[in-house]
């Protein structure tokens, strides 16, 4: 349930409230927040009892496993060793050196930002990072392996020490707010929340990511020590009579925070609000350093409620620290009961939660995990049971206590008041933290502004864009969204489209689908294919069709999908209205009314102006959208549009010239035209035989013949059934001698116009050549163009030579020119073809063209969508793997772990030989360079143009590369030269030149 409430305190000052706008996490038994939450509601215990073979394979000693005190249970995190390092630009070697905790924190911070509707690669708000993690067993394994030299130790420290935890996330995600690591043992991550809240309220950042992890290495059970805090039974039972201690668990979690007023203004859907936080320390008021203190816990809860400005009578839930220990739980129960009763809570008023019963104790991440659970409780109004709870611990003081332990889940109806809850987290050593959260108010429903589309045009088609770093990840992302759509009936499709367009990273593999319903969009996402968009964007060529492609209502698809089109079209019509008011009004009707008489629109004087206006407005709108053409190719009338777009003609002058051209041609004798699937030489034979002329050569296998209607009819009758022929719907024989009377009139209209230089190369129909930028066009050329053969095939061939791999976008009605471009070996996308214009624009984005998908969506709210499906490779540093699986004999030293083979030599074991040294002969300088690249970057089989820094290298690795190559080659290797020439080929050339120069060490 996600009921809203009639706010009892609408006048309450919310300027200090903090909204939780995004969340992400991976937990024992659950790969994401939603399945985890459902498991909590069912009261499931998600810890794992591991088998002996599994433990031995993970590196546990048989002597330990077989000990009667060994407890083979923990909250096990699956795939903790996987990392999508390529997405973050991290080399395989650097990634392998990193503690899995820090890898997972990077991925989870990414997902939390996505969930908040923020592109993780584009900082839109000044964002701080507050990070916590457990002590690095991964680092300890490497340092105690005795396989690292001094430089290797330095690298391991730099990759794992907590100093770099927050700053690495800030660097990899490009975040510029404060980046701080908080370490206070078990309370670390809730302390980090407090620090982030204070930073937001102090104006140090506009947004904050709080992220925490606890992943042991390896993930094993524990040996129970009598009197210790770890469970002997393998069950964590907070507040239960059978409670005997805690269980270790692994997981990672992140939240994104913003000031509530800012989040509300942005239309965010918060999971809840943080209305008060507090942090303190026990000092010496306890039995020992590691013991809890009732005094300190009472004080921190009192301070947090004071910061929230509420009494305990407003609370309905408390997520306790609740480790299930014999000493800790009674002290916590007593402290919370005392302070909450004092501050107004009634007996049994507050339900207690204890997530450690489900997943174990996530150490430094436990507070943040508890916060996420509590936010879900207040958001959905459902309180999960305490997993495995049977009988209340008799040591707990229940008389008059405001606390109660729910034995079953229940719905929490807050009535007229918002649901409010507390979260406690206490660290060994005495740093206590408490956070008070509140159910978020329902967002104010507002009508989204309408785009500048023609009034009355359909506006219910939506574009969903998805991208990923790999084809598999793209498929998984698309399938996740497809599965989510039918379940998200309360989420507007427009908000979904907007969030995908603005709140997701734009990655190399892309797909875009359109649809008018959830079902249609989901089906298309399931069938979507990946378009690789890596590398530089291809050149774009605009194709501008000529007369014959027009139809009534042809402006509507562009008005419905292309931002800015309507305003630009209005500009064109406003110019026309100044000198031909009747035509402008009639033209508007023709462009938007599908029932406008087609025969009237075919009249030359109306058709040519109509086509020019649509093409000019659509092309200009595309440029403003980000799609700048490298060249323009207009067919017949389309050449005039190209001249205007290229700056040769101003808009008003172009409209005047097109109007004069249409009238002059309309006054010429009528005629007919037919397109034939024949080569030019065959077309000329037929033209001579039937008294016709070659009007256009569109492709090497397609020509247009034109002349009198009777001659065209005779040709069609004779060729029918023998050669492919189609009579065009035209009233005149354009580009033939029948147009001679119009030539002088067109030149007279063009002569007084100021003609600028060509700024964008465009196709001359008469010559089939591209007019280069800077060239000049004479007025007579516009007149001769009406009479000359359109050599479009030659023009497309010239474009293919000048812009190999170009994408041709047909900017106008129909798709005839797209077919011609494909015949010339070019890729073509018709905006006015069978697919919708919005779908075509999405396809351009998917192909890697600089189209802004946000401009193709309505304004909308950020919504919570499925996050990125991280599924990187398993990575393990060789030094961390030295602790090999034990045999039952458990005898002798662990064997050295083979390192990956490198170019120029076989695999080797730790400390054996020199990288790249083969079994026969001395390795070449190139082989030595390749070997050192493989060692430092973890990459082999590289192209000579591979860049050291693009592959994850940095300045420190360059220094190490210089040292290693110097040792290999016996020469001094200058770091500066490696920096200024960073490719593999340049490094090899440098090594060879240094050997020749003989500058020995």
Image (spheres, rainbow, N blue to C red):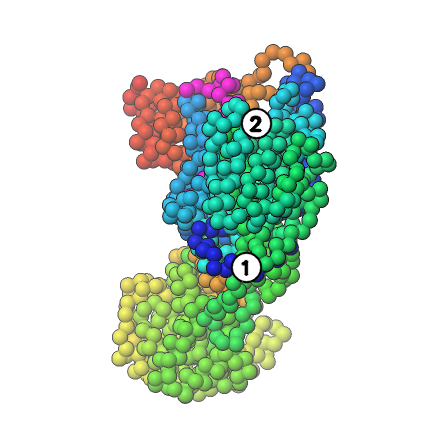
Q: Position of residue 997 (x, y in %)?
A: 29, 24
The reply, left or right, for residue 739 in relation to residue 727 is: left
Residue 520 found in image quarter? bottom right
x, y percent for residue 671:
48, 84
**Alpha carbon distance from label 2 to label 1:** 48 Å
Residue displayed at 68% across by 33% down: 393
Asked if residue 7 is positioned above or below residue 140 in the image, the reply reads below
Q: What is the span of residues highlighted in magenta in the rendered image?
A: 128-150
Q: Which residue is mark 1?
A: 7
> Residue shown at 47%/72% (left/top)?
453
Q: Is residue 352 left or right of residue 816?
A: right
- Asked if residue 676 shows in the view, the reply is no
Instruction: Check disc 2 and report the residue beneath it.
Output: 217
x and y, in percent, of residue 621 in the image:
41, 67
Q: Which quarter of the figure has residue 977?
A: top left
Q: Nearer the viewer, residue 185 or 794?
A: 185
Left or right, 430 with respect to 803, comes to right
Residue 147 is situated, as x and y percent measured from the top left of the image, at 49, 18
- In the picture, the quarter occupied by the N terminus is bottom right
Q: How many marks?
A: 2
Compared to 696, does 581 lie above or below?
below
Foreground: 81 or 261?
261
Q: Nearer the viewer, residue 97 or 76?
A: 76
Image: 622 above or below 538:
below
* Residue at 50 percent of width and 37 percent of height: 299
Which comes sooner in the sequence, label 2 or label 1?
A: 1
Q: Nearer the viewer, residue 935 or 270?
A: 270
Instruction: Report the mark closest to the observer, 2 or 1.
Output: 1
Residue sitting at x 66%, y 37%: 398
> Would residue 129 be counted in the magenta stretch?
yes
Magenta run includes residue 298: no
């Amino acid at each position: 349930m996600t009921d809203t409430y009639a706010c009892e305190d609408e006048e309450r000052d919310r300027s200090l409230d903090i909204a939780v706008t995004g969340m992400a996490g991976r937990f024992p038994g659950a790969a994401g927040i939603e399945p985890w939450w459902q498991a909590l509601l069912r009261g499931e215990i998600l810890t794992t009892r591991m088998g002996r073979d599994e433990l031995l394979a993970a590196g546990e000693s048989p002597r330990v496993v077989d000990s009667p005190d060994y407890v083979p249970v923990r909250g096990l995190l699956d795939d903790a060793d996987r990392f999508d390092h390529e997405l973050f630009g991290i080399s395989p070697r650097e990634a392998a050196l990193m503690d899995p905790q820090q890898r997972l924190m990077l991925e989870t911070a990414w997902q939390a930002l996505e969930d908040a509707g923020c592109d993780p690669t584009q900082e839109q708000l000044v964002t701080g990072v507050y990070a916590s993690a457990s002590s690095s067993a991964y680092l300890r394994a490497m340092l105690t392996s005795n396989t690292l030299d001094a430089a290797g130790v330095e690298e391991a420290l730099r990759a794992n020490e907590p100093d770099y935890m927050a700053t690495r996330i800030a660097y990899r995600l490009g975040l510029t707010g404060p980046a701080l690591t908080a370490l206070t043992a078990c309370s670390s991550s809730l302390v980090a929340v407090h620090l982030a809240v204070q930073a937001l309220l102090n104006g140090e950042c506009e947004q904050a990511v709080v992220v925490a992890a606890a992943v042991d290495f390896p993930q094993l059970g524990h040996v129970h020590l009598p009197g210790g805090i770890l469970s002997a039974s393998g069950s964590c039972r907070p507040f239960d009579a059978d409670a005997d201690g805690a269980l270790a668990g692994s997981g990672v979690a992140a939240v994104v925070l913003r000031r509530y007023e800012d989040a509300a203004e942005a239309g965010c859907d918060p999971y809840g609000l943080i209305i008060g936080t507090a942090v303190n320390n026990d000092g010496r008021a306890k039995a020992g350093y590691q013991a809890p203190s009732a005094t300190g816990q009472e004080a921190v809860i009192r301070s947090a409620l004071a910061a929230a400005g509420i009494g305990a009578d407003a609370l309905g839930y408390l997520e306790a620290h609740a480790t299930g220990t014999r000493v800790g739980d009674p002290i916590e129960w007593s402290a919370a009961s005392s302070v909450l009763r004092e501050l107004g809570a009634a007996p049994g008023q507050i339900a207690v939660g204890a997530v450690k019963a489900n997943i174990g104790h996530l150490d430094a991440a436990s507070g943040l995990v508890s916060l996420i659970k509590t936010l879900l409780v207040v958001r959905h109004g459902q309180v999960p049971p305490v997993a495995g709870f049977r009988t209340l611990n008799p040591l707990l003081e229940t008389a008059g206590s405001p606390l109660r332990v729910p034995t079953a889940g229940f719905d929490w109806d807050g009535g007229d008041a918002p649901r409010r809850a507390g979260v406690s987290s206490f660290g060994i050593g005495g740093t206590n933290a408490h956070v008070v959260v509140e159910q978020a108010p329902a967002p104010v429903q507002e009508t989204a502004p309408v785009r500048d589309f023609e009034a009355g045009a359909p506006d219910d088609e939506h574009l969903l864009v998805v991208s990923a770093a790999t084809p598999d990840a793209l498929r998984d992302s698309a399938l996740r969204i497809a599965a989510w759509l039918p379940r998200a009936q309360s989420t507007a499709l427009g908000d979904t489209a907007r969030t995908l367009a603005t709140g997701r990273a734009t990655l190399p593999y892309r797909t875009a689908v359109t649809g008018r319903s959830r079902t249609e969009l989901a089906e298309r996402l399931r069938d979507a294919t990946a378009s690789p968009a890596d590398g530089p964007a291809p050149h774009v060529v605009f194709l501008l069709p000529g007369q014959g492609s027009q139809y009534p209502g042809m402006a509507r698809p562009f008005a419905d999908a292309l931002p800015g089109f309507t305003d630009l079209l209005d500009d064109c019509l406003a110019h026309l209205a100044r000198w031909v008011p009747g035509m402008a009004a009639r033209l508007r009707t023709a462009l938007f009314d599908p029932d406008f008489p087609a025969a009237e629109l075919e009249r030359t004087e109306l058709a040519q102006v109509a086509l020019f206006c649509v093409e000019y407005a659509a092309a200009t709108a595309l440029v403003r959208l980000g799609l700048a053409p490298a060249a323009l190719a207009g067919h017949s009338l389309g050449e005039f549009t190209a001249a205007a777009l290229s700056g040769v003609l101003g808009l008003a002058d172009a409209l005047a010239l097109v109007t004069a051209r249409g009238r002059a041609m309309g006054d010429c004798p009528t005629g007919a035209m037919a397109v034939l699937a024949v080569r030019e030489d065959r077309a000329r034979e037929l033209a001579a035989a039937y008294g016709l002329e070659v009007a256009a050569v569109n492709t090497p296998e397609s020509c247009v013949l034109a002349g009198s209607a009777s001659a065209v009819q005779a040709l069609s009758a004779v060729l029918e059934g023998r050669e492919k022929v189609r009579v065009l719907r035209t009233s005149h024989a354009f580009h033939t001698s029948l147009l001679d009377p119009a030539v002088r009139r067109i030149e007279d209209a063009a002569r007084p116009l100021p003609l600028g230089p060509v700024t964008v190369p465009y196709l001359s129909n008469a010559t089939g050549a591209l007019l280069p930028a800077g060239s000049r066009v004479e007025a007579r050329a516009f007149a001769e163009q009406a009479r000359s053969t359109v050599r479009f095939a030659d023009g497309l061939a010239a474009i293919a030579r000048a812009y190999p791999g170009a994408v041709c976008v047909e900017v106008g009605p129909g798709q005839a020119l797209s077919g011609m471009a494909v015949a010339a070996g070019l890729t073509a996308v018709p905006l006015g073809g069978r697919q919708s214009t919005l779908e075509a624009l999405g396809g351009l984005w998917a192909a890697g063209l600089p189209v802004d998908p946000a401009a193709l969506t309505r304004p909308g709210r950020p919504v919570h969508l499925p996050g990125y499906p991280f599924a990187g490779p398993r990575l393990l540093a060789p030094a961390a793997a030295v602790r090999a699986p034990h045999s039952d004999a458990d005898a002798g030293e662990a064997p050295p772990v083979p390192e990956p083979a490198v170019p120029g030599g076989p695999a080797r074991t730790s400390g054996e030989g020199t990288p790249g040294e083969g079994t026969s002969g001395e390795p070449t300088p190139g082989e030595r360079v390749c070997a050192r690249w493989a060692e430092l970057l973890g990459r082999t089989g590289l192209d000579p143009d591979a860049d050291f820094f693009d592959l994850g290298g940095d300045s420190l690795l360059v220094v190490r590369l210089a040292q290693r190559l110097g040792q290999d080659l016996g020469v001094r290797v200058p770091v500066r030269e490696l920096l200024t020439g960073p490719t593999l080929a340049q490094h090899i050339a440098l090594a060879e030149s240094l050997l020749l120069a003989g500058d020995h060490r």
